[in-house]
Image (spheres, rainbow, N blue to C red):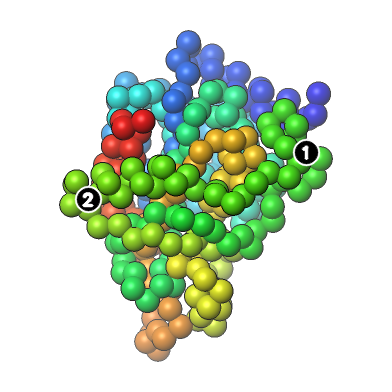
Amino acid sequence: MDPRVEKIMSAAKYIADRLGDRRPFAGIVLGSGLGKLADRIENKTVIPYGEIPGFPTSTAVGHKGNFIAGELGGKFVVAMQGRFHYYEGYSMDLVTLPIRVMKVLGIQYLFVSNAAGGVNFDFKVGDLMVITDHINHLPNPLVGPNLAEFGPRFPDMTRPYDMELRKRAFKLAEELGISLKNGVYFAGTGPSYETPAEYKYFRLIGADAVGMSTIPEVIVARHSDIPVFGMSVITNEAHDDYAEDYVNDGDDVVEAADAAADKMTTLFAGIIESL
């Protein structure tokens, strides 16, 4: 057996043994400062990443590092309270390991979130952006021998973010009086924040928000034919016309994400309940 598959199956078996006969309906990945959603999960089982065979540890600010299972929106879900990033020094196999583990556990949908800089001039701190498409400047996680057990060599990426899930999000947001943006997410390697010239470049090539994650997980989910819903919380204005004393600060990003996490949690729970 491919060593990568062995690692996936070992981690999935450990988690499945902890969950008993419950199979998750959806998987959720919580980005920087967005772990608050985990507090809304009921009857939960909390498994620290360090206990799961083959799982790395999450070192990023605002990522608690727990795998959580329980009820949200009336359905049984699993959630990553913190993700793994390429900039932490992990291979793409490790960055995306949890997605394939969740596939083995039986998820039917994947919900991903992140804290992002708004390069679109119309975006303000605290806005929620439904991701419609992406631009990837991270290594593609499917490079290398194909894991045929999970999907085809050349998966289609015409619609990486599910149109039906996006429609449900906007319908629910209108009912709840929550304002939503939509746009294209750009991901680079990090960990340094981008320069003003780079922000301008991202805007010119069609990006609305920029971050350092999410896309590898989405690619792996789509490789396994899992429908994906993605949302960015705009935590800073990523412009090229800053004041002379402006500084991008990671703690400020987490604080801004935390302030918007309640609205995102309400939307995620509502969409899951509607499925």
Q: Quadrant of residue 52?
A: top right
> Residue 8: in sight, yes or no?
yes
Q: Identify the residue position indicated by label 1 in the image.
A: 146
Image coordinates of residue 124 in percent, x first then y, are 31, 69
> Residue 256: in sight, yes or no?
no
Q: Please name the amino acid that badge 2 sits on.
A: Glu
Against 197, residue 111 (above or below) is above
Image coordinates of residue 123 in percent, x first then y, are 34, 69
| Relative side of 93 to 231, left or right | right
Disc 2/disc 1 C-alpha distance (Å): 42 Å
Identify which residue is drawn at 59% across, 51% down: 158
Q: Please name the amino acid that badge 1 sits on.
A: Asn
In the rendered image, the residue lying farthest to the bottom is 244
Are dots 2 and 1 in contact, CB under 8 Å?
A: no
Question: Camera-side residue: 97 or 60?
Answer: 97
Question: Camera-side residue: 210 or 155?
Answer: 155
Q: Identify the residue position indicated by label 2 in the image.
A: 174
Against 227, residue 192 (above or below) is below
Identify which residue is drawn at 69% across, 34% down: 151
Q: Secondary structure at mark 2?
A: helix
Crowd rating for badge 1 (residues with CA inside 10 Å; few <14, some 14–19, many 20+): few
Where, quadrant-wise, is the C terminus in this rendering? top left
Q: Secondary structure at mark 1?
A: loop
Image coordinates of residue 242 in percent, x first then y, are 40, 84
Identify which residue is drawn at 44% across, 55% down: 131
